[in-house]
Amino acid sequence: MRFKIITDSTADISPEILKKYDITVASLDVIMDGKPYKAVDVSNEVFYAHLNDCITNGKKLPSTSQVTPFAFEKVLEPYANLEDTFVLVLTIGKEMSNTYYSAQKAIENLGMKNVHLFDTYIVTFGLGALVTEIAKLCQIPEITAEELIEKGEDLNSRIWMYFAIDDLRCLHAGGRLSEESMKQGMMARLKPIAYIEKKVEICSKAMGHGMATKWIAERVAAERDPMLPLYFGQAMANEPIERYKTQFSQQLQLTGEELNYTMGPIVVTHTGAGCAGIAFFKKKS
C-alpha cells in the first residue's frame, strides 16, 4: 500500500522535507495590497519585507483566505479511490480556518473512500511537526492504513507548542490585544507566550527574551515525550531560537535531529515577525 500525505501551506514545511516524503501542499492565499497570492509562491523574504513596510508606514496589513473546496478537489483528485493508495490529509485546525471544511467537502464531492482527514487543532511548525512524524510512520514496512491512522491520531492528540510573540502590533491589529495593552507591553518589553488549543491562547507574559526562553524550556522539559524529537520554529527570529537551544542543551540531550521551521506568510500575518518557539509531543497519559 502506498501512502500519500496532503497538508496545507500553514504547516510551513521546508521544500527538502516535502520532497523527501512526497508531501503535497494545498495553498491558502495571502492578500497583499488587495491582491491575492498563493502563499507557496510568496517567499518569506518578500513577505516579511512587505509586512514590515505596512507596519512601519501605517499601511493596510496583509490578510489571508482559506483553501476553497474546489482547490482541494484539484489536489485530491489524482488519488481519489486508487486501489493501491491511501491518502492522509492534515490541515490547519478548523477553529482557525475553514480549510478543514474545504477538505471535508472536497472528499465528499469526490466520493473518496481511500482517505483519512485528521481533525487537528494545530498550525505552523506544530502542524509541520505532526505531518513530518506521520510521514515517518508511512515509511514503516508493511504498516496498514488502520495502524497508520491509529498511530497518527495518537500523535495528533499529543502535539503541542509554545511560542513567544515579539511584535505586539499584529496581535493588536487582529483584535487580540487592545491598543493600551500593546503600548504598555512594548514599553515594558513584555513577550506574550502562547500555545494553540484550537486557537491561539496567551498563557504567560515574560519580561524579555531571556525569561521567555526560560519559561518555555522549563515547560517543554517537564511535558515532552523524550522518545520524539523537538521542532524549533521561528519567524525571522534567529537569536531567540539559538537561546532556546542553549537553554535546552542545559536540560536535555539534543540528538541533532531537531528541525528548524520558518513560519510563513499565513501565520505571521496574524502573529507578526519575531515569533519563536518549540513544538513537541506530550508524554502519554
Image (cartoon, rainbow, N blue to C red):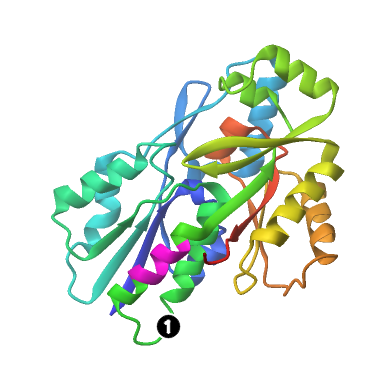
> Would you say 58 lies left or right of 132 here?
right
The residue closer to the viewer here, 207 or 5, is: 207
**Kind of residue indicated by mark 1:** Ile
Q: Quadrant of the N terminus?
A: bottom left
In this rendering, the answer to whether 111 lies above or below 171 is below
Residue 11 spot, x, y in % from top left: 50, 51
In this rendering, the answer to whether 224 lies above or below 264 is below
Q: Residue 185: name its quadrant.
A: top right
Q: Residue 150: say if magenta.
A: yes
Q: Residue at x 43, y 80 (%)?
A: 139
Q: Residue at x 57, y 65 (%)?
A: 283
In this rendering, the answer to whether 243 lies above or below 53 is below
CA neighbours of label 1 inside 10 A, class few (<14), some (14 to 19), many (20+): few
Q: Residue 53: say if magenta.
A: no
Residue 200 spot, x, y in % from top left: 55, 37
Q: Residue at x 65, y 21 (%)?
A: 54
